[in-house]
Image (cartoon, grey):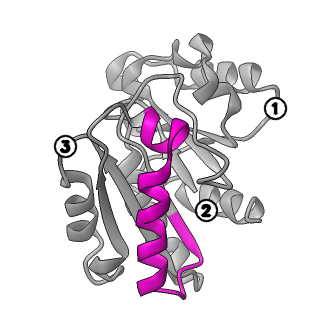
Amino acid sequence: MGVGGPVGSGKTALIEALVPILAAAGREVGVITNDIYTQEDAEHVRRTLAGTLDPSRVVGVETGSCPHTAVRDDPTMNLMAAADLLAEHPAVDTLFFESGGDNLTLTFSPALVDVFLFVLDTAEGDKMPRKRGPGITDCDILVINKTEIAAHVRCDLDRMLADADAVRGGRPVAATDCLSGAGVAALAALLEDRRP
């Protein structure tokens, strides 16, 4: 499963909210993060999910270049990381690939993921769905995250969700608040429905 979206949209927080739900449902989860020069996201996931997810099931890929390259144009680094993780943990049946933060054109190679989530957050403004871009229009599930702060950042959440529905032609849109967990279980159910 690929998770992409702009910097700060809550990709890491979303994965950290989904993993306990999936693990409780019996899924064996692994996570591969992508950062340009650091292991920061991987280290964050390991700390946050300590006790829920074996730290060796979290791998950080340092792309050294634009995140598009590592998850869409040439996913070799991620495919190699996945092969190593699965060799060490053959029971893993759910593998998240988190892209480094990027713009609305980010997509994932079908050679890398079966399901693609794109994450926007309310702090970016309710105009974001109207900007479209392949990340928004082509993903399997569009996630509108940080719903809890919408009123504080002058975001009309109802309009943002309606616009997201309109530009996606009825394809799934999920609203989440990863801090309280609101909407995360419903998103996990959507992911299960799309499992190959």
Residue receiving disc 2? 188
Q: Which residues are magenta?
A: 68-95
What residue appears at the point 59 percent right and 19 percent down from the top-left corner?
129
What residue appears at the point 70 percent right and 66 percent down from the top-left corner?
192
Q: Position of residue 153 (x, y in %)?
A: 34, 20
> Mark 1 or mark 3, which is nearer to you?
3
Q: Nearer the viewer, residue 60 or 160?
A: 60
Q: Nearer the viewer, residue 189 or 86?
A: 86
Label located before the other in sequence (3 or 2) = 3
Residue receiving disc 3? 37
Label located before the other in sequence (1 or 3) = 3
Q: Is residue 191 above or below residue 162?
A: below
Distance Cα–Cα, label 2 vs label 1: 19 Å
- Residue 40 as seen in the image, left or right of residue 154: left
Answer whether residue 91 is magenta in the image: yes
| Residue 179 visible in the snapshot | no
Label located before the other in sequence (2 or 1) = 1
Q: Residues within 10 Å of mark 3 (few under 14, many from 20)?
A: few
Q: Is residue 24 above or below residue 79?
A: below
